[in-house]
Image (tube, grey):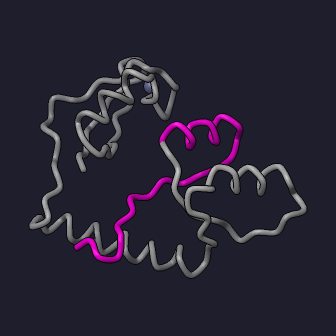
Amino acid sequence: MIKYKLSCEDCNLSFDSWFASSKEYEKLKKLKHINCHNCNSLNIKKSLMSPSILKSDDKNHLAIKKEIRKYQKFIKSNFKYVGKNFSYEARSIHYDKKKNSNGIYGKASIEEIKELQEEGIETTVVPWFSENDN
Ligand SMILES: [Zn+2]
């Protein structure tokens, strides 16, 4: 994974964002999926700082991974796993108010997440490691 420092050319907000690869960044940028959290502008630039790339021997990486695993454990014990049906389940919870749910987690593409957000359905994206990935 790559962390980029991004900055908005309109309001000067700078923020960090994680991407699977530099290619993914380019793709999202092209699809206009990278916008400013503050003013929604699409005039986002990668700052000159070199990206930090996570390597498995990186101490920060291990710390982050530990945090993510803790978070994963929390999610697993509190939320219902719905796998690839994530966006379907998220919609049914959102639109069918009678349905009681503590929350769900599952897999969704960037496009699906974007669609859900446009519909006002709150989602949180977390990096996810599989059990046997060290
Ligand atoms: Zn902005």
Residue at the image position 30 percent from the left and 75 percent from the top: 66
Rendered image quadrant of residue 44: top left
Residue at the image position 59 percent from the left and 70 percent from the top: 81
Residue 98 left/right relative to 20: right
Residue 14 coordinates in the image, percent (x, y): 34, 34
Relative to 51, say whether 134 is above or below. Answer: below
Q: Main secondary structure of the magenta part?
A: loop
**Which span of residues is magenta-colored?**
110-134
Residue 122 coordinates in the image, percent (x, y): 64, 49
Determine if the magenta segment contains residue 117: yes
Residue at the image position 12 percent from the left and 37 percent from the top: 50
Determine if the magenta segment contains residue 4: no
Residue at the image position 63 percent from the left and 56 percent from the top: 85
Rendered image quadrant of residue 127: bottom left
- Name the residue furthest left: 57
Regarding ligand 1, which quadrant of the image does it lie in?
A: top left
Relative to 54, say whether 78 is above or below. Answer: below
